[in-house]
Structures are given as C-alpha cells and as structure tokens.
Image: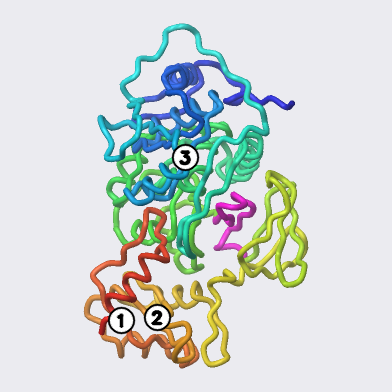
Amino acid sequence: MELLPLLPDSGMDTIVAYRGATPVRRSDFLADVHAIAASIPQTDHVLNLCRDRYWFAAALFACISRGKLGILPNSAAPEIVSELIRELPDLVCLGDQPSIAHPLPYLQVSTLEARQEVPFVPLIPADRAIVHVYTSGSTGKPKAHVKTFGRICSCAKTEAARMWAVTKNPCAVLGTVPFQHMYGLESTIFLPLLGGGMLSSPLPFFPADVADALEELPEPRLLVTTPFHLGKLVESGIEFPEISAIVSATAPLSGELAREAEQRLGAPILEIYGSTETGQIATRRPTGSPRWEVFDGVSLCQERGATIASGGHLEGPQILQDILELEDEFHFHLVGRNSDMVNVAGKRSSLAYLNRILAGIPGVRDGVFCIPDPEGERGRLAAFVVAQGLSQQDIQSSLLGKLDPVFLPRPVVFLESLPRDGNGKMRAAVLEELIARHIHAK
C-alpha cells in the first residue's frame, strides 16, 4: 500500500496559509487539523459547510486524516441537503458559523482549541477516497464523483509545476471562486497546500474586495478566477496590487477579454481545461495560442467520435464531454461541449460560441442564449440579456454581422441581472425557470 504525507515535506515554521494578512505556519495548520480530527463525531460521511477558506481546508484535511469522506454538493440549499440526508443517514456537518439551518449533527470547527504538543504529519493511503465532488448542474442534475488522495496529490503537483513555471516561484493564492466546486477545490485549496504555495482565506467577489484581499498577501500572488469575474475586474477601473499570474476556468475565455485583462492587470493569464469528472487536464495561454497542452502524463485519443483522456492523475480512461480537434495526443483545440451544440434549420453552432458573440456587443453587460422549445419551431433560439438602453432590434442587428440569421434570438428578454452561481455559470434548472417565467408564460 502506497502511503503519502498529508502535507508535503517542509519545515514546521513554513508559511502555508494566510488568514487575512496573518500568516499561518505549517505547525499551526496541522494543530488545527488534529483538533478537528479528534472532535469529528462517529460517521463515514461529512458535509463541509465552512464559509472561510482556511477553516474549510482545515476541516477537509481533518476528514482526510480520519478516513472520513467529504461531501461537497454544489449548493447548500435545503432541498439538496435533504436529499443528501436521505442518501447518507450517518451524515454529519462541519462548519465555522455558530449554527446551521439543516437537521444534522453539527460541529463548529472554528471554536476548537488546538493542541499544544508538536504536531505530526499523518500518512494517508494513496487509494483512500477523500471527497465526493458534484458537477455544477449547468447541463442537468448534479452528479457526484469520487476523488482519491493519491490522484489529487498528483494533479496538484502537476498544476503547481505549470503555474510556478510562469510565476517563477510558488505563490500566495487568492480565489474569487467557490472552493466546494472542483475548480476552486483544486486551484485554491490543493494547489497551495499540496503544491508548495500559500492558501488565503477570503472569498472576495466585488473588485474592490479583490484588490483589498490581494493587498494583504505577500508577493508573488496568483489570482484564481473566472471569465465572468475577470470582466468585472477589467471594467472596474480599480488599481490592483501586483499579480504574478491569473488563472481562469469554468467558461471559455475570449481572446479579446484575455488581452484586455493582461494589459489592465499586468499579469499573464493561464486558462485551465478540465471537468468535475477529470479534474484539470490541460492549460493554454489564450493571448499566445488557441491550442491547449495537456498535463504531463495525460494523453488523448479519439474513438468513434469521442475523445478519451487517460494517464497522469486520472483514475482511468475518461470520455470527455467536449468536442475536441486533436493536433496530436498532447495538444488540441476546443470546439465546444457535446451538450452545447445546437442545430437550427440544419445549421450547427455552439451555445458557448454564440454567448461569446453576444457578450462582445458594446453595451451588453451579460447575456446567454437558450432553446425555449427544443422540439418545436426547429429549435429556435432566444436570449436573456443585461443591456441598459439597448433594444431587441439593436441586439439582433449587431449579431447579424457575425452570425447566420437562423441563430438570431427571438425573443430577446432583457433582465436587470442574470442569476449566475459563484463560478459564473447558469445552472440548467435556473435557466429553465427563466424560460418558463419570461418566455413560455407570455
């Protein structure tokens, strides 16, 4: 049995995290991990609802050390937690707030007193299942995927090698993305703690809060974000502290936004390709080349129209849900998601591509295409748009110069904002509600 240390080898005085501007030594983090581990009630399944990234990480690593499976749903909504309780009757909850709204045994981890003795680093079986991570729900009902400690460690080290090659040194990592989802979990929890960087506790959303959180961290700094958040940072006009590199994922990043962001924020951008099923498997520099390069050890092949990834940190061969054009087994171009492709009057396109064109119209702050009735009217498209002062004719006229007329949205529904999640995604159920309320009800 292969055993791996809970944290990489380094001195106990090594700084592994920042709580605001306060540094946390490796020994202090381990002391918090041990205190939580010793207090976890008897169970096999733990729901981690910590809102602070530091306490989330400490609780997660405590569960790993005790052999408890961390349950990380994409939402803590009552109906979702109720379903988890039905599926997992022994479920208990860890959090950092005084109480929770769910009928579960609860432990507030942020009030536990750390032990004073010199902490030790537990050894963890590489094949130990440590988390159930759920898909975002952007293409249907969220699905759980199990991740083992050895594969997570392998991916974190591979990502670290690629990130630190750009930044020149390991970084303090700040994320604007939820850390319960796969992207945030890998890049703001496991990358710093297993890849030699430094975790930071805040989860800033507004540009001013991002600037303040960056200011509290030492250089070099790595910002983990999404195209949605990146656009807000570029528009803000705020001056940001020096950033060594920016990481983007969860949605395709347009070349135009990437160039604007690099110029505005003064940092190179790395875009990550991956999924909940696979974890991260490739990166690219969107301002340098449209092609992606897979992580070391990962390779791609195509069989019967499907792309299969294997090797590296993957648990086994994995069929990808995207349409890729392979240059070779290590490089590819992303065409779109299988579920994203639309066929209108015999002509094909990608919703992601259409959304990028829509978002690029001057005056459009946000927007998304949809298919209100896939079975009727040849799959005619509609769009929800946030654009003050523009009309449906303005939107359609702007699109007509870039799209075939069959892809023009009819109708265009104007909203004050779009209900995106913390990763900037529109969940399928939320989009269906908008369609029912604003299109079918008319």
Q: Which residue is mark 2?
A: 372
Residue at mark 1 to residue at mark 3: CA–CA distance: 38 Å
Identify the image quadrant of the N terminus: top right
Measured in 3D between alpha carbons, the distance from the residue under mark 1 to the one under mark 2, in whole angstroms, is 7 Å
Q: Which residues are magenta?
A: 271-289
Residue at position x 33%, y 25% in the image: 110
Q: Earlier in the sequence, mark 1 or mark 3?
A: 3
Residue contact between numbered discs 1 and 2, judged by CB atoms under 8 Å: yes
Q: Give how far across and how far down residue 141 sits, in percent.
A: 47, 60
Front residue of 401 and 315: 315
Amino acid beneath label 2: Pro
Alpha carbon of mark 3 to alpha carbon of mark 2: how far?
36 Å
Q: Nearer the viewer, residue 411 or 221?
A: 411
Q: Are marks 1 and 3 in contact (CB under 8 Å)?
A: no
User: Does the magenta segment cover residue 288?
Assistant: yes
Q: Quadrant of residue 7?
A: top right
Residue 406 x, y percent position in the rendering: 47, 92
Q: Which SS class for mark 3?
A: loop
Q: Residue at x 42, y 41 (%)?
A: 174
Which residue lies under the disc numbered 3? 88
Give the side of residue 311 with respect to residue 218, left or right.
Answer: right
Above or below residue 69? Residue 120 is: above
For mark 2, does the 10 Å Cα neighbourhood hold few (<14), some (14 to 19), or many (20 or more) residues? many
What residue is pinned by disc 1? 439
The reply to whether dot 3 and dot 2 touch (C-beta < 8 Å) is: no
